[in-house]
Amino acid sequence: MLSGAVVNRYARGLLAFAQEHGAIDDIDAQFVQIAEAIRVSKPFRQLLSNPILPTDVKLSTIERIVTGSLRDDVRRFLAILLKRGRGAYVGSIASRYRELVDELHGRLAIDIETAQPLTEAEEQAIVTRLSQAYGKQIVPRVRENAELIAGYRIQVGNRVLDATTQSALRQFRERLLNGAVRKEGTR
């Protein structure tokens, strides 16, 4: 079975359960913490996908990461995943669950990568324009990347708006190379 199908099936099942029990946002809050720990810690990712470690060792590690106590339903859900050898999917399931919750609440998460810090007014202008274009509440995730030289790159799902100097220089270089190739080919 494809990993995307596995991730989607578990995330949708968890969302259906959360809707039935009125716990959508509570479960989401715990999975956000777990997903962040998975994102920043390679040893934690390895621990979850290790087939030799017992499930209770993995669960106790997760419980130490989550602020407060782990919900019983989240603990049971994670135990099922880990017992079925799906520990490597926990981060992806958490991300997909978050996407489904955002969709349910009419939110759209976007990534904004900037060469230099955005002012609050600049960020708000971007959020306002995208909110009008998509008709949803925009949730921006902003991070700096000095390699962009100047400008910003916005990613909404699979779409990317690249207004960076790095991109402009790359396109200019490609045009120069293509022009040189065409010129040589006509002689």
Image (cartoon, grey):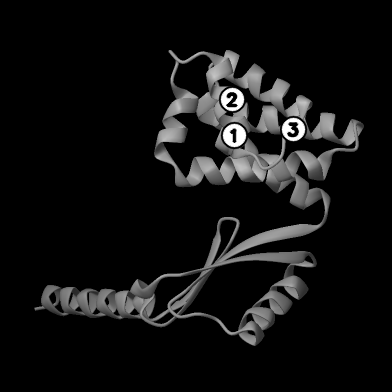
Answer whether residue 84 is visible to the viewer in this image: no
What residue sits right under mark 2 in the picture? Answer: 60
The Cα–Cα distance between marks 3 and 1, rounded to whole angstroms, is 26 Å
* Left or right: residue 187 compared with residue 103: left
Q: Nearer the viewer, mark 2 or mark 3?
A: 2
Q: Secondary structure at mark 3?
A: helix
Q: Amino acid at mark 3?
A: Arg
126, above or below 93, in the image:
below
| Residue 106 % position (x, y) | 81, 57
Q: Classify 10 Å Cα crowding around label 3: few (below 14), some (14-19), many (20 and above).
A: some
| Residue 97 % position (x, y) | 70, 40
Which residue is rendered at x = 51% and y = 13% of the image?
A: 54
What residue sits right under mark 1 in the picture? Answer: 64
Which residue is rendered at x = 64% and y = 83% of the image?
A: 120
The Cα–Cα distance between marks 2 and 1, rounded to whole angstroms, is 6 Å
Q: Quadrant of the C terminus?
A: bottom left
Q: Compare residues 69 and 167 and report the one nearer the observer.
A: 69
Asked if the residue under mark 3 is in contact with the one under mark 2, i.e. CB atoms within 8 Å, the reply is: no
What residue sits right under mark 3 in the picture? Answer: 12
